[in-house]
Amino acid sequence: MNHPVIPIAVLDSTKQRKRQAPKGRRVDPAALAEVQALLGTESRQRDLLIEHLHKIQDRFGFLSAGHLAALAQEMHLAQTEVYEVATFYHHFDVVKEGDAAPAALTVRVCDGLSCEMAGARDLLARLPALLGREVRVIAAPCIGRCEQAPAVAVGQHPIANATVDAVTTAVNAGAVKHEPTGFIDLSAYRAQGGYALADECLSGKRDVESVIKTLEDSGLRGLGGAGFPAGRKWRIVRAEAGPRLMAVNIDEGEPGTFKDRVMLERDPHRFLEGMLIAAWAVGIETIYVYLRDEYHGCRTMLEAELAKLRANPPIQNMPTIHLRRGAGAYICGEESAMIESIEGKRGMPRLRPPYVAQVGLFGRPTLEHNFETLYWVRELLEKGGAWFASFGANGRKGLRSFSVSGRVQSPGVKLAPAGITIQALIDDHCGGMLPGHTFYGYLPGGASGGILPATMNNIPLDFDTLQPYGCFIGSAAVVVLSDKDTAVAAARNTMRFFEHESCGQCTPCRNGTAKAAELIAKPKWDLELLADLSTVMRDASICGLGQAAPNPIDCVVKYFPHELA
């Protein structure tokens, strides 16, 4: 059969076809105009991505696909990169084309361990029907108000010791904002001698060596959980070539921890002065403060007080201070994950080495500190390192701020000697157990710090004292269990939290937390399989989340075998 030959034109190899339009989702002009109006003259630099996502979320109540595409174009970023960042954080509601937007108001009911023990499940069961479809009721991981359990956030308004009536009243009244009161503002702080110490440092009345030596003599360690000696950290970063940066971690997401929030709500400038002294001692000109998104009132207050500082600097050549907002990711409490988030990325921990002190924020040597560590700087320098070291119990030195929640009469932040026992902490600082409750067990270091029985009530609570028992103190978040609770239920709660909060970067943590949660949800535990899983997670996870997640399970097996019988 003969067919006609159709010639194929050969394109000039030197010429390439030009696309009629860029690949990917087209940018809607209306969405682009809205994003441009919202951002105004603010910088479009890469590290402000999360800040700009917050602006859109706050303005519209969600992140539409159109707004994400428009933001990507405006910031000269790939749409995939913007989408990946937006979907990584729990507090961003990404709405695709054709999907319904969330309700205008969100009520978050904390289902952390302390809140679950106080009745959070009942609130979650009853509130949706009472509040109606116009309000979204969701379970939220720990919101940093464990002493107020059960804690609920109506929009940005926290409700302590929440009841159905209290939440309903707040919703009906439109009480969705938090305006903190009663804190020591700049004028009151200066009237009490505030920033005089910082001025002494900057004016040359104090020298760097003596200041760092005082910190070393005090034995002050990082109070975010890692416990690295503060003075030594200052020396390490100071020895690095400049420019150096500082990153301050106020993203206390460990269930049971709330001390930083309480201190910040009371006396913000004590922390800020310590921060400025640290910047002077290490030679830092730019500081980034990373604040947990759940602390809306703290952010409002801190923005106002920082504005006062900038308008009337207490010291010459005050460093530039940037306040950055978290977005609901427990993993960003890990220092390198926090740095990734400050840079506008997904909060995934970095492999080490190099360490943050050498290669940190924007690739520069970075002094990373927890809020409370800096909070102590002024007091230590005024009273001396020996004063701080003079406190302690059972052979330990210093003071600790314990976040205590659970079945005690008086939960809250308790300042007590390092090395105090759990029994003394309950009896002498918390008013004893709740009426009708008998001490049964405790978590000495939050969700990841393990679980110990009441019979082990004489162990000094401090760094390095709990490791022989498979536990650690971390940020000193103590959750007290009674005979109305079980260690099994506590372990299930904490493992659900870890599964929810795993960043997903490494398989041992991503799959391990999910598998562990599945296994311990069963009436009978497969102890051999759980032991193997624990070993893999500890040995192969990139960061402390996956490495410490098995602690509660291992402790139940070791110290509460009667619950598994």
Image (tube, rainbow, N blue to C red):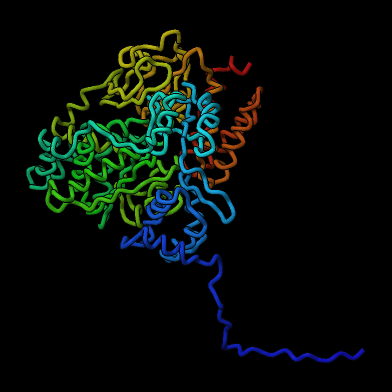
Q: Position of residue 24 (x, y in %)?
A: 56, 66
Image quadrant of residue 384? top left
Q: Position of residue 214 (x, y in %)?
A: 18, 36
Residue under the point 25% across and 57% down: 243
Q: Is residue 451 above or below residue 74?
A: above
Image quadrant of residue 268? top left
Q: Position of residue 48 (x, y in %)?
A: 37, 56
- Total labels: the figure holds 0
Apparent side of residue 375 relative to residue 72 in the rendered image (left or right): left
Q: Position of residue 548 (x, y in %)?
A: 48, 34
Give the quarter of the figure containing the C terminus.
Answer: top right
Residue under the point 64% across and 31% down: 529
Residue 40 visible? The answer is yes
**Outermost residue, front side:** 172
Apparent side of residue 182 relative to residue 352 in the rendered image (left or right): left
**Outermost residue, right side:** 1
Apparent side of residue 351 relative to residue 363 in the rendered image (left or right): right
Residue under the point 30% across and 27% down: 401
Give the quarter of the figure containing the N terminus.
Answer: bottom right
Image quadrant of residue 554? top right
Residue 478 visible? The answer is no
